[in-house]
């Protein structure tokens, strides 16, 4: 991962931690759930983009530190393979 991207992610996490004091425990959990969904969506589109570039399921698995079968199960049929790829452009 590029240092600049990593720093932006660290800054984002820092900002989320800072709002902790402004939210109730219930509200914070809701925000964490929302952030997780957005990260999962980003992961899905990153995998789709990587696959479009010619990466194999093994390449995807290696990057996500999982098995090829696990990557295909998580992102394959009814996942990455069914995304409207024009949204990635």
Image (cartoon, helix red, strand yellow):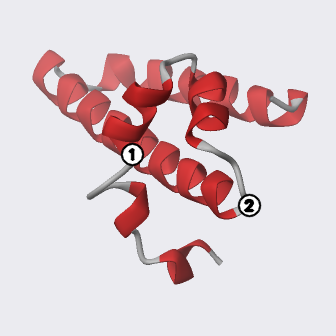
Does residue 74 appear to the left or right of 52 in the view shown? Answer: left
- Return the residue nearer the eye: 43 or 19: 43
**Quadrant location of the C terminus?**
bottom right
- Return the residue nearer the eye: 23 or 80: 80
Check the image and report above or below for 15 versus 51.
Answer: above
Residue sitting at x 58%, y 72%: 88
Q: Classify mark 2: helix, strand or loop.
A: loop
Q: Where in the figure is residue 8, as x and y percent of width and height? A: 73, 35
Q: Where in the figure is residue 73, as x and y percent of width and height? A: 32, 37
**Residue 69 position by quadrant:** top left
Q: Are marks 2 and 1 in contact (CB under 8 Å)?
A: no
Q: Where in the figure is residue 48, as x and y percent of width and height? A: 54, 57
Residue sitting at x 87%, y 34%: 4
Does residue 81 appear to the left or right of 30 in the view shown? Answer: right
Count of numbered marks: 2
Residue sitting at x 67%, y 23%: 10
Q: Which residue is mark 2?
A: 53
Check the image and report above or below for 35 versus 44.
Answer: above
Q: Which residue is mark 1?
A: 75
**Mark 2 to mark 1: distance in Å?**
16 Å
């Amino acid at each position: 991962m590029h240092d600049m991207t990593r720093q932006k992610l660290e800054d984002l996490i820092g900002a989320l931690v800072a709002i902790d004091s402004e939210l109730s425990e219930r509200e914070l959990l809701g925000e964490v759930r929302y952030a997780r969904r957005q990260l999962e969506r980003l992961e899905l589109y990153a995998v789709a983009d990587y696959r479009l570039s010619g990466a194999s399921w093994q390449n995807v698995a290696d990057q996500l530190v999982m098995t090829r079968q696990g990557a295909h199960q998580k992102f394959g049929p009814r996942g990455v393979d069914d995304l409207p790829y024009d949204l990635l452009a």
